């Protein structure tokens, strides 16, 4: 395991089945206007980057990486899904995001019914921005809302005004986007039940057809972690998080949005995020951009994180890969159980070892797995099981 950038070669055996599984392209945009105190994603403010890198040098690097990617894969299939994430892709503007999609088209082509998503921060969007994205070929937008409560947004260091995400969702729909996601974070210190209820109701009134709701994670090395350590803020409480999750699920279900992954709800099967389903179902994807991760046929690799190192590697004609690993049979088994068990479709019981199947039987008895699904040969989490998904996974693979 592990190799310096220049020696990364994708084994022929890994790319052989390309096109028989869904193929996605992820593009990482490593820029944010300011850093939110809770976030440890690979992203940089202009002040942090100085003159070392810029959106222009990043875009040159991206084009170069995508060309190298197409050559590495031989004759890659057209992308079934594209997901531009960050960071803050909307800082590139509609023109910049159109250029990103053109670069993907040029390298791989797009399937006729491709799903093309970009994440956007509400404060850097407008009706013109969404119209430009539509014209460029984007089919889906994902907006970081987090909360409707001003005091919660302040703790999270979010700079948008509370009403802006819902207005942005409406503008996206008016521009012709049928598929709009809003991200929520729950469990923020100081968030009350009525704040969370208002956030979910705001999402529903905005007409989003998809919601991602994440429990606040206090990531090591973030400003939030330092504030918690100093005792300025309490850490999120597990019982509160569980009650919050149940409230979110019941409000969304009541409005016709159903969970299809533990943290994701959709108004219809077409509203589900196909790109993320590709990750969860063991598909292939090329992740381009600083720090992006890729997976093709059981080989996983990840790029150097700093935008300046990334641009320099590509300018030198090399894939900007920091390291790679070949998944063993047991790695792949563990990942499959971990990811598929989180889906509403669940996991076929016959992929489990005999001890895992026995544990699944016990988990049905404890109300963690659905008895009807188990009778049909699938492990599907119940509502209570979803609150304890990680613990159930550990039992099924031990
Ligand atoms: C990395 S952000 C990128 C999109 C965009 N910049 C934004 O903030 O909306 C994607 C989502 O991850 C979630 N997220 C990031 N850090 C998190 C944390 N520490 N705990 C829970 N959710 C987090 C937020 O909901 C955010 O909308
Ligand atoms: S949460 Fe989003 S906007 Fe905030 S720092 Fe992270 S990537 Fe940037």
Image: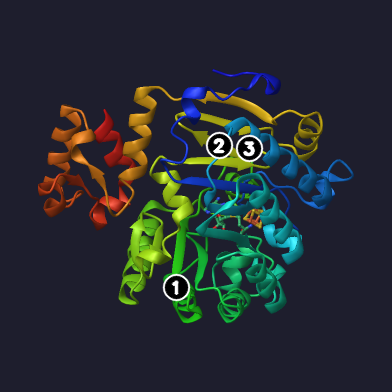
- Quick check: marks 1 and 2 in contact, CB under 8 Å? no
Q: Nearer the viewer, mark 1 or mark 2?
A: 2
First of labels 1, 2 by sequence position:
1
Q: Nearer the viewer, mark 3 or mark 2?
A: 3
Q: Extreme right residue here?
A: 51
Q: Which mark is residue 294?
A: 2
Q: CA distance from mark 3 to mark 2?
A: 13 Å
Q: Residues within 10 Å of mark 3 (few under 14, many from 20)?
A: some
Label 2 SS = strand
Image quarter for ligand 2 equals bottom right
Q: Position of residue 238 (x, y in %)?
A: 38, 52
Q: Position of residue 160 (x, y in %)?
A: 67, 70
Q: Dot 1: what SS?
A: helix
Compare residues 147 and 79 and report the one nearer the observer.
Answer: 79
Q: Position of residue 320 (x, y in %)?
A: 70, 31
Q: Quadrant of the C terminus?
A: top left
Q: Point out the tag, 3 or 2, that comes first from the N-terminus.
A: 3
Cβ atoms under marks 1 and 3 closer than 8 Å: no
Horizontal side of 218 relative to 250 (left or right) equals right
Q: If the image is split into quadrants, where does the N terminus sit?
A: top right
Q: Comparing marks 1 and 3, which lies closer to the viewer?
A: 3
Residue at the front extreme of this rendering = 75
Q: Which residue is mark 1?
A: 200
Q: Secondary structure at mark 3?
A: helix
In this figure, what is the number of numbered marks?
3
- Number of other residues with Cα within 10 Å of mark 2, as a class: few under 14, some 14 to 19, many 20 or more: many
Q: Is residue 333 left or right of residue 304?
A: left
Mark earlier in primary sequence (1, 3): 3
- For image coordinates 26% across by 48% down, the residue present is 346
Q: Which residue is mark 3?
A: 70
């Amino acid at each position: 395991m592990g190799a310096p950038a220049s020696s990364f070669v994708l084994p022929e055996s890994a790319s052989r089945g390309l096109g028989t599984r869904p193929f996605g392209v992820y593009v990482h945009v490593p820029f944010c206007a300011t850093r939110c105190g809770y976030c440890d994603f690979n992203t940089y403010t202009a002040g942090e980057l100085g003159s070392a890198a810029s959106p222009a040098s990043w875009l040159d690097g991206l084009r170069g990486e995508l060309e190298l990617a197409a050559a590495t894969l031989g004759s890659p299939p057209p992308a079934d899904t594209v997901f531009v994430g960050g960071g803050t892709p909307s800082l590139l503007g509609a023109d910049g995001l159109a250029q990103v999609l053109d670069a993907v088209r040029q390298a791989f082509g797009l399937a006729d019914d491709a799903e093309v998503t970009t994440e956007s921060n509400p404060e850097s969007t407008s009706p013109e921005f969404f119209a430009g994205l539509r014209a460029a070929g984007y089919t889906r937008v994902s907006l970081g809302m987090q909360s409707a409560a001003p005091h919660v947004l302040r703790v999270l260091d979010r700079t948008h005004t509370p009403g802006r995400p819902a207005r942005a969702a409406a503008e996206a729909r008016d521009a012709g986007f049928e598929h709009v996601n809003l991200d929520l974070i729950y469990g923020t210190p100081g968030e009350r039940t009525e704040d969370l209820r208002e956030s979910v109701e705001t999402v529903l009134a905005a007409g989003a057809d998809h919601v991602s709701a994440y429990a606040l994670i206090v990531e090591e090395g973030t400003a939030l972690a330092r504030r918690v350590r100093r005792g300025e803020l309490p850490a999120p409480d597990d019982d509160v998080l569980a009650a919050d999750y149940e409230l979110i699920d019941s409000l969304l279900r009541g409005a016709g949005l159903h969970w299809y992954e533990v943290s994701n709800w959709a108004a219809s099967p077409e509203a589900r995020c196909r790109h993320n389903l590709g990750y969860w179902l063991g598909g292939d994807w090329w992740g381009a951009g600083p720090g992006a991760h890729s997976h093709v046929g059981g080989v996983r690799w990840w790029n150097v994180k700093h935008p300046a190192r990334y641009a320099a590697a590509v300018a030198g004609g090399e894939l900007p890969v920091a390291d790679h690993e070949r998944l063993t049979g047991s790695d792949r088994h563990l990942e499959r159980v971990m990811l598929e068990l989180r889906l509403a479709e669940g996991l076929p019981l016959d992929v489990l070892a005999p001890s895992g199947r026995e544990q699944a039987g016990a988990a049905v008895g404890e109300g963690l797995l659905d008895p009807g699904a188990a009778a049909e040969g699938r492990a599907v989490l119940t509502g209570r099981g979803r609150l304890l998904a990680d613990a159930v996974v550990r039992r099924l693979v031990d």
